[in-house]
Image (tube, rainbow, N blue to C red):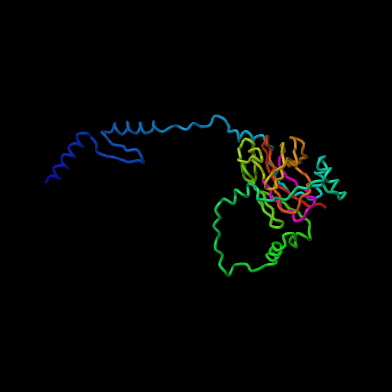
Amino acid sequence: MARVKQRAQTRQQTEKEGVVLRWNYGRTVILLIGGLGVLALAAQADSAKPLRPAATAQSPEGAQLKQLPAPAQQVGRPSKAELLARCQQRPTCRAKLEAAQKGQKPATLRPAATSPSPEVQQLKKLPAPVQPVTPRRFQRGTSLWSLNGLLAWLNPLRPPVAEAQAGVSIYLTPQNPYVRVPDSHLRLYGIHMFPGNYHLTPNVTVLSTTTENKPFVYIEFSAPASGWYIIDVRASSAAAKLLHGSGTSQSIIETWAAGSVPCSASICDYATMEYLQQGFHYFYFYSPTHVYTFYSVSIESYP
């Protein structure tokens, strides 16, 4: 009886205050009080939300990208003859080529890495990716390649058969960044990616003291034997640097001023030659001042 009396009192109080409906919208509670209350509460809820203004000017990244020439429609793989011709056009590269043609070696070669690069060390901190389980009946058996790899581990100074009997010719792109023999790959740090185009802008900060905290192209190359190698980076015109890393230290091996690189249809060849020690090598290509489009990396043994 007491409960029925309490309900009647509550109903009378509700009718007296004019509260007839209640809605919950997330964190907002709306009480319908005679009709005017709804409008007042709705207006209060709308005014409490901050208005995000639209941009009144283009972003710095968009402004810099507008400075680039139209990207090349077709960027093919350069031949060895083309790379040698590009090398001839640059005095420092031409001097190295003439020494290689005479069978001369530099006073100091570029040493192979004695420890993983900082980039590889960072990647090792990541958790292992989940690998799909392959049914046993679809697993591959022992192959000639795995036997060669085993022999290489037993004798580290003996390069695999395929590498020892042929010259090196590597072509890496963002679409095809890895080559198994010899083990080589590239990675891009701090890029703006558009369909089919990869741009690097100096106003993007990358945590890498190696490249002055600028976006860069990271190239890892396993030299099967000590000798001369042609290294060519294809990109749009920019002031750029190429660094060589041995795992614990880095050194600048080539610097290009803006407009000093031979170009054709907005494709420029940053070519150099280096005498590399057998083993793994790390290269860093970057521009401290210019935005540019990256296309590919080629590495050829010489002769």
Which residue sits at x=81%, y=52%?
302
| 213, 62: nearer the viewer | 213
Which residue sits at x=60%, y=67%?
139
The part of the image, by quadrant, that contains residue 58 is top right
| 77, 223: nearer the viewer | 223
Q: Does 161 appear in magenta?
A: no
| 203, 16: nearer the viewer | 203
Most distant residue in the bottom direction: 137
Which residue sits at x=19%, y=34%?
16
Most distant residue in the right direction: 102
Q: Main secondary structure of the magenta part?
A: strand
Q: Position of residue 242 (x, y in %)?
A: 72, 42
| Residue 70 showing in the rendered view | no
Q: Does 234 appear in magenta?
A: yes
Q: Position of residue 77 (x, y in %)?
A: 74, 50
| Magenta span | 218-236
